[in-house]
Amino acid sequence: MEVAKIENVSRTYKIGQLETRALRGVDLTIQSGEFTALVGPSGSGKTTLLQLIGCLDQPTSGKVFVNGKDVSTLNRNQRADMRRGTIGFIFQFFALIPTLTAYENIEMPLLLNGKTPAERRQRVNQMLEAVDLVDHSHHRPDQLSGGQQQRVAIARALVTQPALILADEPTANLDTPNGKLVMETMVRLNQDTGVTFVFATHDPRVIQYARRVVTLRDGVIVSDGAGEAPGMELMAAEPKGVA
Amino acid sequence: MIQLIKMAFRDLGRNRRRTFFSALALGLGLALLLLIAAVIQGELRTSMDLTIKLQTGHLQVRAKTYEADKSSLAWEDLVAEPEAAAAQIAALAPVKAATPRLFASGIVAVGDETAGVSIIGIDPASEANAPYRDGMVSGEFLAADDRQGVLIGRSLAELLNLKAGDQIVLLVNTANGDVDEQPFTIRGTFATGSPFYDQTTLFMPLTKAQTITRTEGYASTIFVLLNDRDQTEAVTSALKSSQYEVVTWQEMNQLLTQINQMSSGFMVVIYLIVLGITATVIVNTLVMAVFERTREIGILSAMGMRGNRIMAMFFTESTLLAVGGILIGLVLGGIMVAYATYVGFYVGNFGIEGMLIGERIYAYLTLTDAVTLIITAFIVSLLAALYPALLAARMEPVAALHSGD
Ligand SMILES: Nc1ncnc2c1ncn2[C@@H]1O[C@H](COP(=O)(O)OP(=O)(O)OP(=O)(O)O)[C@@H](O)[C@H]1O
Ligand SMILES: [Mg+2]
């Protein structure tokens, strides 16, 4: 099943007279269950692409489908609803709400989705276990290490069982052991729950976890192929060439 | 909802000092307004009570042609057989006291010094004179058959250096336009709480006043006190006659009534100024909070929180701030108002004709004023949150997420 589909998408940023063509006619399809890395040099358009798939932004031209639905023409509230129901985000900075505990941060998306207290308790505890943070559930973000914070963020992204998790350089602010732990957590959750992951990264140590690697350069996809993840079969659709 | 409150509460706790000072600003504003409202209300009430008690009564029955400010003494301007009329009025149930009074103008002379006074001829036995009788500070109250005695107020006594037992000469305008001059003895001095009144009023028994002004058998007015102010209208219509007119305390105290109305308008202006300043502080606090939390707003938005929910978050924060501020305001205001109510302020001799002001002002906070102010403060706090909340809700999630990196 196609979780996301990008059709001939361009995104041009205008700052005054200056136009930056961050994406120029990109086609990409993400299948359910993928574990895909978006790679490419700085400024190549990775973040822009994730934001478009994630309904945080809208394309200048072209179409974006999420779960088969055209999201390129949705209004603000419709996009918010789309994100709430189907997409989880993990950011480079750990992006937790500083006044809430780990538990409450993870609970937040469930609250926004109007889940019952019992459902929330069950899901949050399940996620705390999945990211191995049961003992830290009542800590505030400033009482957690960077790696722990990022695992809370992963739990929060997954707690609503979304169709798609988008992670923008999830390990960039972590040291090697913590980065490894975060990536292993993501891999495990992908395998256990079948949730789709798309993550942007520069880091070769991270790229090695991917089963599919999409490379961007100057706003176009220059290569799309199987990753080097050991012992993992490629689940992605047939590689797409340059747009 | 509980979660929103919890978050808002913790968010306010992030910058405790700023939160405290914002709440304090609201609290001080509210306390100040409570005090102002209470003082104005208290002043107007006591002023009205004092004026009714001492000067105008609730009702006066007088000749249609009588002009109060001229103290006219022509017979056609006076009430004939006033004792009988007063007795008739006093028989009505809502009437506490009805007594004839005669007003004349005169000059007190002691040695080289003189002072203008309003001479009031009273029936010493009447209950309506209780405020003067109770206010005696020296000497004795008048007896009905006293032909030489007068009472003067304490301020006049101080001004002219007089005491009970002293002699004065009184010059009085009479009904036929002459000025009569007679010696009198001061029987006593009184203090009513209105220094202005005490300095300009002289009492003598009605019969003596009639004799000296050549108005035997007449009075300027029948002074009527009711058991309850609210019965004014009923009694007025009961007393309607072709011969005399019935004047109510509202009509006789138009200045005060006008001031009363004006003060409401004035209060609205003060409310707006004080709460406007307070609102600015709250707007400022919340706008700072929005900018500090730009990224968090982006995160919540990325999670799918809708704009109106983000707005609700800031409104909740503002509501908590308002509740805190109002509590502070009620405590501070309560202390200030309580002090002003029970201790009062000394203002001294401030009265003018038509508005007697006590030498101390006592505050009086009405429930209506208090509730109106609390609600207004609350609404203003919520209005103040509108702009910051919109600012937060309109943030593009992408821009918000990128802030600060
Ligand atoms: N909000 C924006 N306004 C203007 N230009 C932007 C904006 N966001 C991105 N760009 C530009 O678009 C291009 C692509 O940016 P993008 O952030 O997608 O790159 P990236 O691949 O994520 O880079 P990095 O690896 O550094 O994160 C860059 O040239 C960038 O300067
Ligand atoms: Mg990027």
Image (spheres, rainbow, N blue to C red):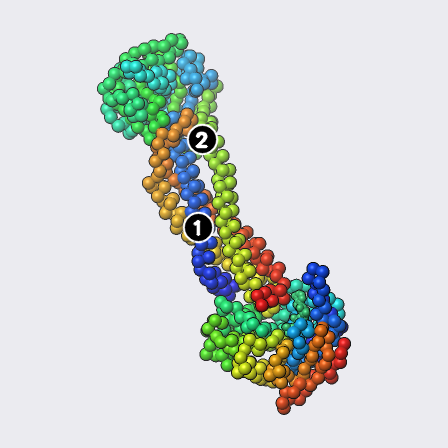
> Quarter of the image containing the N terminus of chain A?
bottom right
In the rendering, at what x and y percent does residue A77 appear? 65, 64
- Hey, what amino acid is under mark 2? Leu
Please determine whether, in this image, residue B312 is positioned above or below residue B76.
below
- Disc 2 residue crowd, few under 14, some 14–19, many 20+, Cα 10 Å: many
Which residue is more in the foreground, A49 or A205?
A: A205
In the rendering, at what x and y percent does residue A22 appear? 70, 70
Chain letter behind tag 2: B
Distance from the alpha carbon under mark 1 to that under mark 2 = 31 Å
- Residue for point 48% across, 75% down: A144
- Disc 1 residue crowd, few under 14, some 14–19, many 20+, Cα 10 Å: many
- Residue for point 46% across, 73% down: A143
Q: Mark 2 points at which residue?
A: B256
- Residue for point 49% across, 49% down: B278
Q: In this view, does A38 lie to the left or right of B62?
A: right
Q: In this view, does A141 lie to the left or right of B363?
A: right
Q: Name the residue under label 1.
A: B27
First in sequence: mark 1 vs mark 2: 1
Chain letter behind tag 1: B
Q: Are marks 1 and 2 in contact (CB under 8 Å)?
A: no
> Quarter of the image containing the C terminus of chain A?
bottom right
Residue B99 seen by the camera? yes
- Residue for point 72% across, 81% down: A223
Give the numbered dot on residue B229.
Answer: none
In the rendering, at what x and y percent does residue A183 appear? 58, 82
